[in-house]
Amino acid sequence: MSNIRNIDRTGTHWIGFDLGGTKMLATVFNHDFEPVGRARKKTKGRDGMESGLKRINTVIAEAMEDAKISKEQVRGLGIGCPGPLDLKKRRIRTAPNLGWHDVPIADAIESEFGFPVAIANDVDAGVFGEYKFGAGKGARCVFGIFPGTGIGGGCVYEGKLFRGTNCTCMEIGHIPLLPYGPLDGAGNSGTLESVASRLAIASDAAQAAYRGQAPYLLHNGGTNLSSIRSGALAESVANGDKAVLEIIEHACVHLALSVVTVVHLLAPDIIVFGGGLIEAMPDVMLPTIEKLAKKRVLPTLRDVFKIKEAELGDDAGVLGAAALAKQLVDEMDKG
């Protein structure tokens, strides 16, 4: 924390920052974690680390301007980052979607503004937000599963993010399910991500459309993967494409097996499912996942957990990041 200037840290505001692959979102919260200012920009692809860090600081400044506060009124900032992190050095190890490697994210923000910065994986930040303010509020242990292009996971245990000594963990998307299954984004075969991510479902749905088994999807979305997003899959199911429904239900089998693994390891009170795919079809996916998971867990563990849909949407990441900043500052104040 050598970059924190010797300023009065008695401000009453917190900032949460969500650094996604396509967007940057900063939200200023008051003492009660009510939003009072916000700013967002699109990321500019692979425009370089230095310009990207400047862009982040610009968004933070614009959020403070929107909230009509100065940096002296901010107690701390938390940022959810894509990709693996170096928690000791507080750096992004790599962010493939941004083309960044070994990025001093916390130092760059602290050098500019002077307030403490907490960093977390973006899924971890979202799960922490659900734990503090959403579907997992009041639970002892919350596990989050977020199917998207990949499948992200995160865990809060007794108020703390479950992380390694120097790295994030809970990479549930990369747990192996099939010995010789399809490859995931990391080149591993038969993982949860390779068979149950939104990308995997869209790929199978595109093949079904090509074969003429999903006429609504073929007519409205075609077979282009970039067009088969969560909403297109939900519309396909709603309009009678039984082949797509079967593909989604098959993915739910694998997601249920991931729940069984999590329950047997951690016995969480709440398992939160979130992300665009779940938001588009909660009534299709969640009851199926829960029913199948309850059948497979040990009888003594069937009633210890509940499966819930994430409640906070896009605000989960910024709320969780801001709450992590408060946790960091509270620990600093305790010495």
Image (cartoon, grey):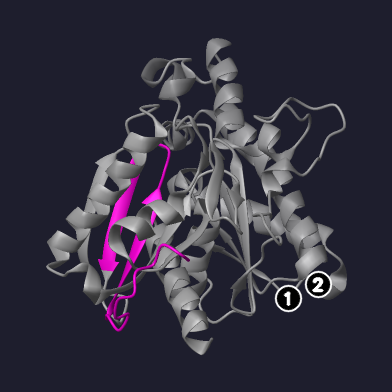
Label 1: which secondary element? loop
Residue found farthest to the bottom: 334
Label 2: which secondary element? helix
- Give me the residue at 46% from left, 65% from top: 2
- Give me the residue at 26% from left, 77% from top: 30
Which residue does the numbered mark 2 point to in the structure image?
Answer: 301
Asked whether, in this view, residue 115 is left or right of residue 241, the answer is left
Image x and y of residue 260, in percent: 78, 58
Instruction: Give the residue type that dot 2 points to.
Output: Leu
Residue found farthest to the top: 211
Q: Quadrant of residue 142?
A: bottom right
Image x and y of residue 285, in percent: 57, 49
Magenta region includes residue 75: no
Which residue does the numbered mark 1 point to in the structure image?
Answer: 304
Q: Is residue 134 visible?
A: no
Which one is in front, 327 or 142? 327
Determine the CA span between mark 2 and mark 1. 5 Å
Vertically, is 237 above or below 132? above
- Give me the residue at 58% from left, 18% from top: 208
Asked whether, in this view, residue 262 is left or right of residue 335, the answer is right
Number of marks in picture: 2
Q: In which quarter of the image is residue 169?
A: bottom right
Q: Can residue 222 be seen in this view?
A: yes
Which stretch appears magenta?
A: 1-28
Magenta region includes residue 26: yes
Which one is in front, 251 or 54? 54
- Give me the residue at 42% from left, 57% from top: 79
Image x and y of residue 126, in percent: 48, 59
Q: Residue 285 carries which label?
A: none
Q: Are discs 2 and 1 less than 8 Å apart at CB?
A: yes
Vertically, is 114 above or below 180? below
